[in-house]
Image: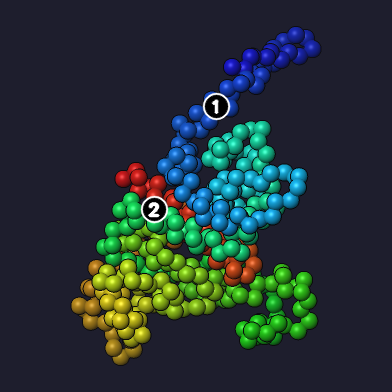
Amino acid sequence: MGSEMCIRDSTGRDLKMAKQKGFFDEDFRLEKISRQGDPLLRLKDLINWEMFRPVLFEAFMKEAKGPGGRPPFDTVMMFKILVLQRLYNLSDAQTQYQILDRLSFMRFLGLQINDTVPDEKTIWYFREKLREKGVIESLFDRFYLFLTDKGLVAQNGTMVDASIVEAPKQRNGREENEQIKEGKTPDGWSENTMRQKDIDARWVTKGGVRHYGYKNHIKADVKTKLIKRYHVTDAAVHDSQGIEDLLDESDARQKLYGDSAYSGEKIRVILEEKSIRNCIHEKGYRNRPLTKKQKEKNKRKSKIRARIEHIFGFMHTSMKGSFLRTIGIHRARAIIGLMNLTYNLSRYIQLQRA
């Protein structure tokens, strides 16, 4: 333990008592953090992080090994850093600082106080490499396979919905925006300008508010609220246009719940062809309002469909995941994919408490 040190003024009076750093002080502080309820401790202990190592190894196995230099950081630890980023929506620089500053972050990553911490450029490079190799979706699928093996995907029906994820707003002129929509490079834009401009994100109005960014289309299990599949588009794509990328053979003979944005003849035909039981909200039209029976059916469906809003609520509040710092749809897909995976990791921990 640390020894006490007495501090005195010039007259010899005691001012305060301080403790010199002791060998076990770090452990004692971590014990106090645990007693306060460290959520990262459960995430560290209840997830077998080694399940992700084969997928990560595949992404990095062809990395050149030059002579000398600092050895690479462990890939599983680096992946856990990306999970921390999505849990708290931290920038690369903020992530480096928080790991250095917080004992709970170091414990989650398996780092000691004297260990080297990856800098922001290393974190950026690791995430970029996963994106380039297309590994993030594989990591999501690997954990989803674990969830199905555990029997946590009940196959009692699925829900679909989409949520806007804000991107850095672009200050373009009207003519520039028109050229971007046409797939052209605006006049006068240099290569350096192009690197700083997001030409993939789009504006959309929802609830009378203008948003700029992308959409996270998800399909989730009704009972467990685990995300089964996701698809990322720009924000202007209608919710219903993303549904075909969410459906697969596992949905056959299952109930599918969705709000009235997914209603319509085209969706009805798709569900029939895939033998999916249609539980999507019915929609009223001009001169053809909903009947009392239809309204009652919609009310019953709402009690189930509303569960998917809990998923986005957790992302937007607990994970602060309603905005991006990146530019371009490829990086947006990577960040949103990690966001969906991190949600599933967190939801799994919640389900273990039940």
| Residue 198, position as x, y percentages in the image | 65, 72
State the SS at label 2: helix
Quarter holding residue 48:
top left
Q: Residue at x 41, y 77 (%)?
A: 244
Q: What amino acid type should be assigned to the residue bearing mark 2?
A: Phe
Q: What amino acid type should be assigned to the residue bearing mark 1?
A: Asp
Quarter holding residue 187:
bottom right
Dot 2 corresponds to which residue? 146
Q: Residue at x 61, y 55 (%)?
A: 60
| Residue 50, position as x, y percentages in the image | 48, 46
- Residue 53 visible somewhere in the drawing: yes
Does 219 sit above or below residue 152?
below
Q: Residue at x 56, y 38 (%)?
A: 110
Quarter holding residue 327:
bottom right
Dot 1 corresponds to which residue? 27
Does 305 sit above or below residue 173?
above
Front residue (pair 138, 234): 138
Q: How crowded is the residue under tag 1: few (<14 C-alpha within 10 Å), some, or many (20+)?
A: few
Indicate the quadrant containing the N terminus: top left, top right, bottom left or bottom right: top right
State the SS at label 1: helix
Indicate the quadrant containing the C terminus: top left, top right, bottom left or bottom right: top left
| Residue 82, position as x, y percentages in the image | 57, 52
The image's mark for residue 70 is: none
Q: Earlier in the sequence, mark 1 or mark 2?
A: 1
| Residue 85, position as x, y percentages in the image | 57, 51
